[in-house]
Structures are given as structure tokens and as C-alpha cells.
Amino acid sequence: MDCLLAYDVGTTGCKAAVVSPGGNLLHTAQVAYPTHYPQPFWAEQDPQDWWGAIAATTRQVLGESAIPAQTVRGTSFSTTMTNILALDEQGRLLRPCIFWLDGRAGAEAQQVMRRLGGPRLFNLLAGSQVTGKDMIPKLLWLKRNEPDVYRQTKYFVDASGYLLYRMTGRFASEWSVASGLGLFNMKTKTWDKTLFRLFGLDATQFPDLMPSTGCAGGLTPQAADEIGLPPGLPVFAGAGDPMIAAVGSGAVFEGDAYLNLGTSAFIGVLTRRRLNGRRGLVTIQSADPEKLLLFGETSTAGACLDWALRQLYGLEPAPAAFARMDQEVAQVEPGAGGLIFTPWMYGERAPLADENLRAAFINLTVSHTRPQMARAVYEGVAYNLRWILDSIQELYGFDCPTLRVLGGGAQGLPWLRIIADVTGRRLEVLPNPRERLAVGAALVAAVGLGIYPSFEALKPCIPVERVIEPDPAPRPVYERLYPAYQQAYHSLKDLYHQMNG
């Protein structure tokens, strides 16, 4: 039987998935890799780790499933975004990847905004301030602080572009990933040369553009030998993880919305409307060439639960450990005894674009228990998601009554119930939520191969496994605490800037 093989190259590891043309997950494998934090605000990864993980997961998933490599019709991938990789003419890495979590370029972010009238005017025009995690500031940081690397760079690429090169030998940048750079014209689907000149960047250092369903080429003999797939296998460009999440969740029609719960969490709404950004929300190119994605990300979601598991329970993240914490959290009354947690452990993107923010427990007393602290962590992420959803409704008119849910966090029923109750939204949980990005990447390849005529035709391939309706009983508690959560930002932001700026 023919099949597709796709990858979710994420923050903490790579998942490979063998998927049927009908969208059914046949087998999966996963390999982890580290993130390095060499200095405050810095976050780096070694792209060789990504490639090694792709090779390891490919051999594992084919070996364990006994699926012949010759039956694979095509491959693609989902990747993290807003990473900077510098490649020389031979495609060699000149330094480690400046990762999406990296916020080192705060001074350059201020420089970008000064060039456009200052932070206050920029905020009025663009809807949110540029931060040190954004791509243009990162490029300017590299140009200023590592000039030798900058001069030697033939092409700057994101994770997607690096993997396309390793697989096919072709330098390319996929539309949706490129749109996260801030130098991509979403109307013409070209690099915006005017913006390059404005910021003193060189457009020739960025490769040719292609859509998600474009075939970058066949797998080179060297790549085929390294990862264990047939040479010449079609490699499709894929897309960034927010866009692939839309495909994998079945959010493919106008106004469809999804929630991805992973290390970070993001909410996306499919639309044909070009919308100006506000409150850290952005409009970027979707995997579907005909649509855009209104997108808001909270930087640390599942990462906050990982922290709680380690620091409050002394356990490493694992299914049994999460089950124990979930059980305790489920026994705590909504509102966690009046305790509020702000989940800004590594700065924030939406609805507060501010890399200086940090997490905090607010209103902590000697009577609060560990389960209450854990529940406050779960609820804190939910408050932030509600703030994003409320902003989407207020600013753009999308009320998002139903969210398709995917990602590792979708396996935790107490957390899902808390999110439904805090946000007041109906949650539709998908089967195999941890593998949805890899499945979504496979479906992009299926559209590229012509198995499906459009992205909208994928909707029947993605069934709903569980529905969670919001419970009205805890609503009064959350209606009292949610404004206090919002006020925490306004009360503490100056202190955070003083301590971390």
C-alpha cells in the first residue's frame, strides 16, 4: 500500500509519521534533542541534531512498521519558525541556529522601531512592538555582533530551508515560513526589496520562494543513504508549525480555528482577509496558498507544566508523572484558592509582545498547597489563551466558538476542561493529537501529489475524537480572577523592564 512519510521537527524533538493517503496514522517514532542556553536571553540549537533525528526516526518508523521504503510516495515536514541559520556557498552551517525562543536582539528591536518613528508610534501603526525574538532584529544582531559570519553567509534560512537543502541540495524558502521573517509580501508572494533596503539587509542572501505544496526536488543519493529512503523521492516544501497545525487539525475553511498545545501554545484562524496586527497577533501566509492565518502564540504553555512537574513534584516529564499531577489538579476547586500564575516564563508574544516579562505566583499564602499551585499553572496558561481569543474577537470579529485541539497538551483531560471553562469555548479534540503536525505535513504532500484537489478537500480526513463543552458552574470564579490576571501585567510590567531590560 502506498503511503506518505512526514516529520514534525519541533522544539524538543523530531517525530516521524507514516500516514496513509486517507490521513490515517500508521506508525510513528520520536527522537529528542536539546536546546542550549549559553547566555541570558539566548537559545540555540544544533541543526545537525535535527538531521540526525530525521535519520533515526525514519529508520525506526519503517523498521518497526515493516513498511517498505519503496511504498513511500512523498515526504514533507513541519518546522518551528523565526530561527536564523547562516549557510555558506556549500550549504555548511557557519554557527549554531539562533532559535525561536532566543531574545538576545532586544537592542536591535528598539533600533527597528526607532527607524519607524519610535516604539509608541510603531505600536499604533503595527499593533504590537517588535521584540528581540523577531527575525529582523536577530539578523541585525548577527550583522552587528558576528560580522565575519554575516559576510560569509550565502543564504539565511529558517529550519525549513535548511532541511530542504539537506534533502534535495536546493536552497529554497517556503512561503509561510518566509512570511514570519517580516520581509515577505503576502500579496505578491515575493521578497519585499523595499523593506530589505530600509533595514540595511541584502535580499540576495535569501533564497528563492516556493509554496508549501511545491516540490523542492527529489531526495539526493547522499540524503537517501543517510536517512534510509529511496533517492529521487519527491520532497515537498511543507510549512511552519502554526500553518501545519491548521492542516492537521482540519481548520481549512474561512473562520475555522484551532488550538495547538505544545511547549508553546498557539491559536490560529484561517481567513482570506489581510488584517493588521494588534496585541502581538499577526497575519501570516497559511499552508494553503489561497488563505492567510491570523495567529497568536503564548511562548510557554506546556513548558510551564513541565516546570511545575519538575519543581513542585520532583518528577521528569513522562505520561505517568503528568497523570499524577493531573489527578491532583482535578481535585482542586476552580480558582486554585485565589492563586494566580502568570505563564510568561520566557517573555511573551501574544497578547503581550514583551520579552522582558516573567512568570509569577500572585496572592500566594502559607495555606496554599502544591496541588493548588499546580492548578494555578494550568489556569494561568488558560487565562492567557482567553486573552488571545478575546482579542481576536474584539479586534477582528472572529468569535471562535469551537477550537480544534492538537498537540501533546491535548492528552491532559483536566487541562482541557480548565481551558474550556476559562475561555468559554467548545473544544474538539483530535485523534493522535501529539502526531497531528506530522500528519498535517503528510497531507500537505498529499495535496502536492494531487491526491487531493485542495486543502478544503482534506476536511473529511480529520475526524473529531472527543468534544469538551465549557461547564457554566465555575464561570463566576473565573470571571472574578481573569481581570486580576490581566491587571497583573499592567501592575508588574515596569518592574519586569527594570529587572530584565
Image: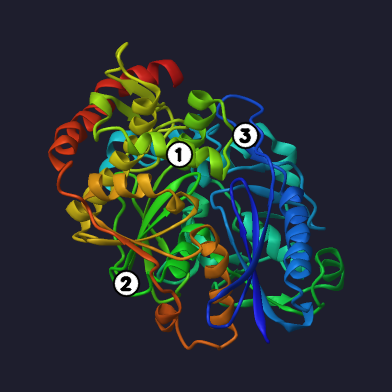
Helix, strand or loop status at disc 2: loop
The secondary element bearing badge 3 is classed as helix
Foreground: 330 or 179?
330
Q: Mark 3 belongs to which amino acid?
A: Arg
Residue 299: x and y, percent? 45, 41
Q: Is residue 379 left or right of residue 406?
A: left
Q: Is residue 278 visible?
A: no
Q: Position of residue 36 (x, y in %)?
A: 67, 34
Relative to 211, is 105 above or below? above
Looking at marks 1 and 3 on the same chain, the residue that comes earlier in the sequence is marked by 3
Question: Residue placed at 32% from the left, 11% from the top?
Answer: 366
Q: Of the residues under marks 3 and 2, which one precedes in the sequence?
A: 3
Q: Amino acid at mark 2?
A: Arg
The amino acid type of the residue labelled 1 equals: Thr
Q: Which residue is mark 2?
A: 272
The image quadrant of residue 3 is bottom right
In this figure, which residue is indicated by the disc labeled 1? 300
Q: Nearer the viewer, mark 1 or mark 3?
A: 1
- Residue on which disc 3 sits: 144
Q: Nearer the viewer, residue 124 or 39?
A: 39
Q: Quadrant of the C terminus?
A: top left
Which residue: 20% across, 53% down?
Answer: 395
Q: Marks 2 and 1: which is nearer the front? A: 1
Kind of element beneath mark 1: loop
Q: Which numbered disc, 3 or 2, marks the residue closer to the eye?
A: 2
Q: Residue at x 55, y 88 (%)?
A: 451
Q: Residue 50: x, y in percent?
A: 71, 52
In the image shown, does 365 or 185 lie closer to the viewer? 365
In the displayed image of the protein, which residue is found farthest to the top? 366
